[in-house]
């Protein structure tokens, strides 16, 4: 892995920082392309974007400090000096960014639900670039594995899962799906805000799948079940995943019933026919036994 992409002696260019810049550039570009499809003012939308970035950074740090309070205490300098005491929470970042964006739109009298769907594809792009940066810089490390897709990290023993790369692929897929869903929203085939709800579900699903194969103690909370520490990210992902799964089941209940009922009836008829055939065969066998 390559934490420092370029060392010019008087300045170091970090790999993760380069990918963050690329994430911001491409995310902003996709957002601009999306907003052009709407009657919204581009300057207000991008003002909201920059305001949400400030909130995102603050809450990312705040969540991390709260979850690792034993390391920070009430020392404000440790909170501010992120280079000396590194650590950010991705869930905290998303919460802070969404909350800040909602407050900004509320002040500007912009309908949050009407606009938020246009932010989702850019957000997936940003997450994908961020995870690629984590992979190439070695800032996120997977657990030991014998899987054929594995890599050796400096300072870690054995071969490790390519966890951040897996997540980057998932987020790229999420960007594609959300982009398609956005046009379904524009065609009024699905309700506004649906792409945002899809993001919450999909992000939680990604963390639910891959959190257990990460070697990362940054986000562990001091709760133990037997001998296993419980990850804050994993528990929150389960809660969000279940919540939005129930929402989607309710939202698509008519669709599920319309297509599920014929299948259910067909299966029920097959089971009934099978039971009837077995009963008839048993009756025949019983009659033969009596005649003999």
Image (spheres, helix red, strand yellow):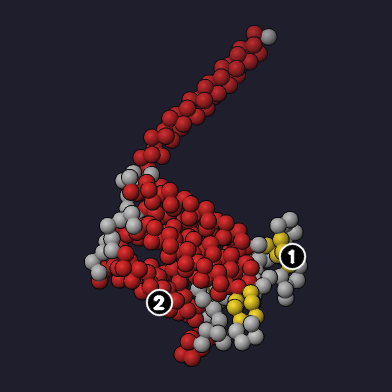
Q: Could you classify mark 2 by the number of other residues whose Cα lies within 10 Å: few (under 14), some (14-19), or many (20 or more)?
A: some
User: At 68% from the left edge and 62% from the top edge, which residue is drawn?
Assistant: 161
Viewer-proximal residue among 33 and 108: 33
Q: In this orientation, does residue 229 appear?
A: no
Question: Where 252 falls versus 4 (above or below)?
Answer: above
The image position of residue 285, as x and y in percent, is 63, 15
Q: Nearer the viewer, mark 1 or mark 2?
A: 2
Which structural element holds mark 2? helix
Q: What label sits on residue 275 in the rendered view?
A: none
Which structural element holds mark 1? strand
- The answer to whether mark 1 and mark 2 are in CB contact below 8 A is no
Viewer-proximal residue among 47 and 238: 47
Q: In this orientation, does residue 29 appear?
A: yes
Q: What label sits on residue 159 in the rendered view?
A: 1
Quadrant for the C terminus, please.
top right
The image position of residue 67, as x and y in percent, is 51, 78
The image position of residue 164, as x and y in percent, is 60, 64
Q: Which residue is mark 2?
A: 54
Q: From the viewer's perspective, tell me whether residue 204 is left or right of residue 32.
A: right
Residue 44 position by quadrant: bottom left
How many callouts does the rendering have? 2
User: At 72% from the left edge and 76% from the top edge, which residue is drawn?
Assistant: 155
């Amino acid at each position: 892995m390559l934490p420092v992409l370029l060392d010019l002696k008087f300045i170091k260019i970090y790999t993760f920082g380069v990918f963050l810049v690329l994430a911001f550039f491409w995310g902003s570009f996709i957002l601009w392309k999306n907003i052009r499809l709407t009657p919204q003012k581009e300057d207000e939308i991008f003002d909201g974007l920059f305001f949400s970035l400030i909130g995102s950074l603050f809450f990312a740090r705040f969540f991390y400090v709260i979850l690792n309070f034993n390391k920070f205490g009430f020392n404000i300098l440790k909170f501010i000096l992120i280079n000396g005491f590194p650590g950010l929470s991705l869930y905290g970042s998303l919460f802070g960014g969404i909350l800040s964006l909602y407050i900004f739109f509320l002040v500007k009298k912009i309908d949050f639900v009407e606009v938020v769907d246009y932010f989702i594809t850019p957000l997936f792009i940003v997450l994908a670039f961020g995870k690629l940066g984590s992979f190439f810089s070695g800032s996120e490390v997977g657990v030991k594995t014998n899987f054929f897709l594995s890599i050796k990290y400096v300072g870690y023993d054995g071969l490790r899962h390519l966890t951040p790369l897996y997540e980057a692929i998932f987020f790229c897929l999420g960007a594609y799906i959300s982009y398609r869903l956005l046009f379904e929203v524009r065609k009024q085939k699905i309700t506004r805000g649906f792409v945002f709800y899809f993001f919450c579900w999909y992000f939680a699903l990604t963390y639910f799948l891959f959190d257990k194969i990460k070697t990362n103690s940054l986000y562990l909370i001091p709760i133990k079940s037997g001998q296993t520490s419980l990850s804050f990210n994993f528990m929150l992902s389960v809660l969000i995943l279940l919540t939005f799964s129930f929402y989607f089941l309710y939202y698509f209940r008519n669709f599920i019933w319309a297509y599920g009922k014929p299948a259910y009836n067909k299966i029920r008829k097959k089971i009934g026919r099978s039971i009837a055939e077995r009963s008839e065969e048993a009756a025949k066998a019983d009659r033969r036994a009596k005649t003999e």
